[in-house]
Image (tube, rainbow, N blue to C red):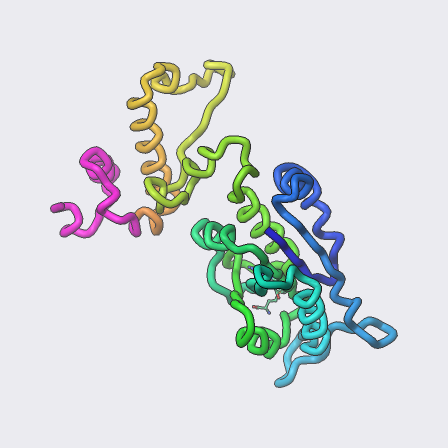
Amino acid sequence: MRLDIVSIFPEYFAPLDVSLIGKARERGTLDVHVHQLRDWAHDVHKTVDDTPYGGGPGMVMKPEVWGEAIDTVIAAGPQGPDGGLPRMIVPTPSGRPFSQELAQELAGEPWLLFACGRYEGIDSRVMAEYSSRLRVDEVSIGDYVLAGGEVAVLVMVEAVGRLLPGVLGNAQSAVDDSFAPGSMQNLVEGPVYTKPPVWRGHEVPAVLLSGHHGNVARWRRDEAIRRTVRNRPELAAAIDPATLDKHDRKLLEELSFRLQPEDMAN
Ligand code: SAM
């Protein structure tokens, strides 16, 4: 997968050299290109922002600079019969929520272009202009406001990168993760333990030492359901009833977590 990232702080992306993502780059699974937006600003101060139309505090990023930057990045990309065009991701608190489902979808793309906003964001005409040529998604990583898009892009690149083939040492890890499609859809993972079996008087649950795979799987699912109901009731409420077995339903009743009456009848 090719990634192009445009930012006024390219140094923010040093972490992409380490750990899983760094190794994926070394192996060539991820081909990352980070660009300094100011390289496309032509005045002596390398200005990338201006005052907002309509007034108000803060500055807005200029469309001409972004336009030149994006045109150049696209032109320098893997053109040709199979090259295609990138899918453009613009981080913004007003975007659609980033999720494991969107990470999975993006992991299937050959080329992503991230445009990191600063100040009050990027002039909206930039997204309008490229929407006619590329798939453009404005994406939020959560209901809070960061100072810039760089950290949001690091979050997305890590979530997407670990899903690429061969990046995780054990491919099963991603299948068992919180939010993974399938049996973990709408569930967060339960607690995890390693050796020793007793630490400062805290014992590892006996079932995990039993070697009984069926009981271990059941216990893990129960704990995932308990934790989801406790920490993320809105996720639990959206569980597809068709994914629940009798035992799951009984546990939800014990937890006084009510599905819709018609769902309980099935
Ligand atoms: N005025 C904007 C608003 O209220 O929607 C916030 C701008 S924020 C200070 C500057 C930049 O940080 C945004 O353009 C975006 O790139 C990034 N950013 C801030 N919060 C974000 C979030 N929750 N998700 C993704 N990007 C975010």
- The magenta-colored residue range is 237-266
Position of 207 compared to 127: left or right? left
Viewer-side residue, 126 vs 186: 126
Ligand 1, what quadrant?
bottom right
With 40 as the anchor, is 228 left or right in this view?
A: left
Q: Residue 53, percent across and down?
A: 64, 84
Q: Extreme front residue here?
A: 81
Q: Farthest residue to the right: give it.
A: 44
Residue under the point 57% across and 46% down:
161
Q: Position of residue 66 (x, y in %)?
A: 69, 72
Height in image: 240 above or below 217?
below
Q: Main secondary structure of the magenta part?
A: helix
Q: Can you say whether 191 is above or below 69 in the image?
A: above
Q: Vertical placement of 129 versus 259: above or below?
A: below
249 within the magenta span: yes
| Residue found 67% across the figure and 69% down from its top | 70
**Is residue 46 shown left or right of residue 217?**
right
Image coordinates for residue 184, horizontal then vertical, percent: 36, 41
Q: Residue at left 47%, top 63%?
A: 96
Q: Residue at x 45, y 49 (%)?
A: 100
Q: Which residue occupies the extreme bottom position in the image?
A: 54
